[in-house]
Image: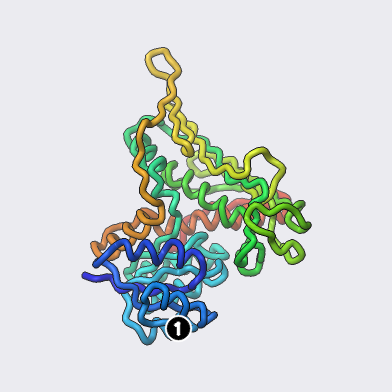
Amino acid sequence: MVLKVGIIGAGGIAKDAHIPNYLKCGEKVEIVAISDVAIEKAEEVAKEFGIPHFFSSYEEMLEKVELDAVSVCTPNKFHYPATQAALNAGCHVLCEKPPAMTVKEAEAMAEAAEKAGKILTYGFHYRHAPQVEALKRFIDAGELGEIYAARVTAMRRRGIPGWGVFTNKELQGGGPLIDIGVHMLDTALYLMGYPEPDTVFGVTYQKLGNRKGVGLFGQWDWENYSIEDLARGMITFKNGASILLDTSFAANVEKHEEMNVALMGTEGGADVFPLKIYQEKHETLIDITPSYLPNKGYHELELARFVDACVQGTKPISTAIEGVYLQQIINGLYESAEKGEAVKIGGKVRV
């Protein structure tokens, strides 16, 4: 079976990650069409990669072209409607992170996938990192025991994106928390077995992004900056576990960028990036570091595994239900920061 794929959104993540890695799948995949509200951009990308059809709307694409699967590569605000349309058209969907703008949207997306009998998975490419895969094997073998605490770090010193719509709250839903923090948060939750969230307490700050400054990722539009610079939070779970989170686009810290997850369990702990495991064995405190890890691209593995799941009918590594839990946490942290108090977010997912 050749998987016929359509792309919704012709921006950087489509051009740099999705399309090139679909092409690496060889004869398993045919990229049939691409859509973008800026039709000239869709046409340009179509010509660059030899995609036969391009459209100004995904509705028209889904109506006129027969597709098996779709990548949703739009700004966050449009994840929900684009995913719903693709699922309703009978397509499997790989939607970029975060799942949506609200919990209700994420729930509706999961419900639509369940109803359609199609795969809905999300672009959490750090799950496919060799460090994460190796540590997951250790965890599954009981080497860390019960993981009851974690620390999530996604910090940039002056890493506000100077392109795209990343500083537009209306289109993105937020800043570093929903953009890069979500990656490390998902990684921690995945390694912890995705426990059901219970309560969150969050704070956000806008101190640096709304004034001109040094931009390590280009000069951002500081005069129209509507997101947070820094978000901090604590998440507790129904099983008693907890996570502390720090994420920023701009903060006065030493490192230009730090992305990491630290886990603490009853039989061991670990840092993920770089991978290091901490244990007590034979009356000795030991640190374990790998001498070799495979070096395959995260996005390459993500797209290859999505294709295999669609073709073989297997469960994807990231599920729609996990997307709902993650959305509960993200939106709960923003709500808590706005209210200035802890927010209860527990409750079974409506799917």
Q: Amino acid at mark 1?
A: Phe
Where residue 303 appears, x then y in whole percent? Answer: 36, 60
Where residue 270 appears, x then y in whole percent? Answer: 46, 32
Residue 314 visible (yes or no): yes
Where residue 215 appears, x then y in whole percent? Answer: 68, 54
**Residue for point 74% across, 61% down:** 222
Residue that extends furthest to the top in the rendered view of this protein: 283
- Element at label 1: strand
**Residue for point 77% across, 57% down:** 212
Vertical comparison of 332 with 26: above or below: above
Where residue 163 appears, x then y in whole percent? Answer: 62, 64
Q: Quadrant of the N terminus?
A: bottom left
Residue on which disc 1 sits: 55
Q: Work out whether residue 170 or residue 251 is closer to the camera in this orientation and state it.
A: 251
Decide: few, some or many residues near mark 1? Use Cα within 10 Å; few <14, some 14-19, many ≥20. Answer: many
177 with respect to 320 (left or right): right
Report the number of numbered marks. 1
